[in-house]
Amino acid sequence: MAAVETGAIHPTAIIDAGTRLHPSVSVGPYSIIGAGVEIGEGTTVGPHVVLKGPMRIGRNNTIFQFASLGEISQDKTAKYEDATRVEIGDGNTIREYVTIQRGTLKTAEGLTKVGDRNWIMANAHIAHDCVVGNDNILANGTTLAGHVTIEDWAGIGGFTLIHQYCRIGGHAFTGGGSVILKDVPPFMMIEGQPAKARGINSEGLKRRGFSPEEISDIKDAYKLIYISDLLMVDVKVKLAEMAVTSMHCARLLAFIESSTRSIVR
């Protein structure tokens, strides 16, 4: 990657006339960029990368060799002519063999979206209509089925499999090889096949500046949700009481109440 100069387009790269590349974009050998692709300032595209539109890629991204971004979805209903697209934000690192595919007409937006500053490791797959927020880590082999949502600051362990329509809350952490069939609330650490809650992501919260008091509140909420014998309806009542003084408990309550698949327990 370092051998590609800023703004250099390798002569073996194939770039459609219908692309829009900032002058500072670098493209490595044998990469193919199709019509309808827009790439912002400072982004580096390595060798043997395939990019297809409609797709917008923002500023200062690094895309490593053999990545395939913007290809038609693997959903059987998808057609090349569908008005669907991919949007990728700024500052992302997208490693070897990552695949990110277009949305489908099953959603109003027809959009697969990746935010900013995500670290997406080799062989990760982001399927149609997924929404990935900011500052997430998707380790090697992570697989997102269609319509998955990952909020911000989540850590997804290697070879984690996430069922379609699941949500992963902010600051959550999944152990390697986990199979996630339900929603994962914010701040939780989960692991297993199928995945179960194992505690809270204490170390991650400390690294991100959560105070001891905030972490204590989240631990109390964890005990309420996962260790007490209360029914979920009663858990919500208790969480609502805790939410009066803790915005993190309020966030947990809102996540649980909005869950359509129920939460990992």
Image (cartoon, grey):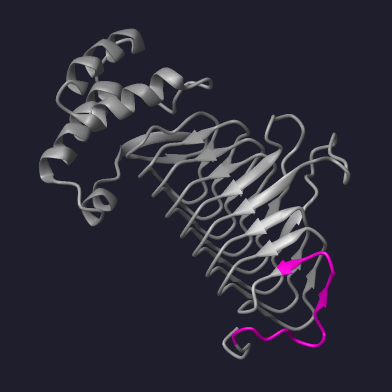
Horizontally, is 205 left or right of 114 in the view?
left
The percent coordinates of residue 229 (x first, y second) are: 27, 14
Horizontally, is 78 left or right of 98 in the view?
right
| Residue at the spot 48% in from the left edge and 58% down from the top edge | 118
- Above or below residue 243? Residue 48 is below
In front here: 93 or 143? 93
| Residue at the spot 59% in from the left edge and 85% down from the top edge | 6
- Above or below residue 1? Residue 177 is above
Horizontally, is 121 left or right of 217 in the view?
right
Examine the structure image and report whether residue 14 is included in the region drawn in magenta. Answer: yes
The percent coordinates of residue 143 (x first, y second) are: 61, 48
The percent coordinates of residue 103 (x first, y second) are: 72, 41
Question: Range of the magenta residues?
Answer: 6-20
Q: Main secondary structure of the magenta part?
A: loop
Q: Quadrant of residue 145?
A: top right
The percent coordinates of residue 69 (x first, y second) are: 71, 59
Quadrant the N terminus occupies = bottom right
Quadrant the C terminus occupies = top left
| Residue at the spot 36% in from the left edge and 23% down from the top edge | 254
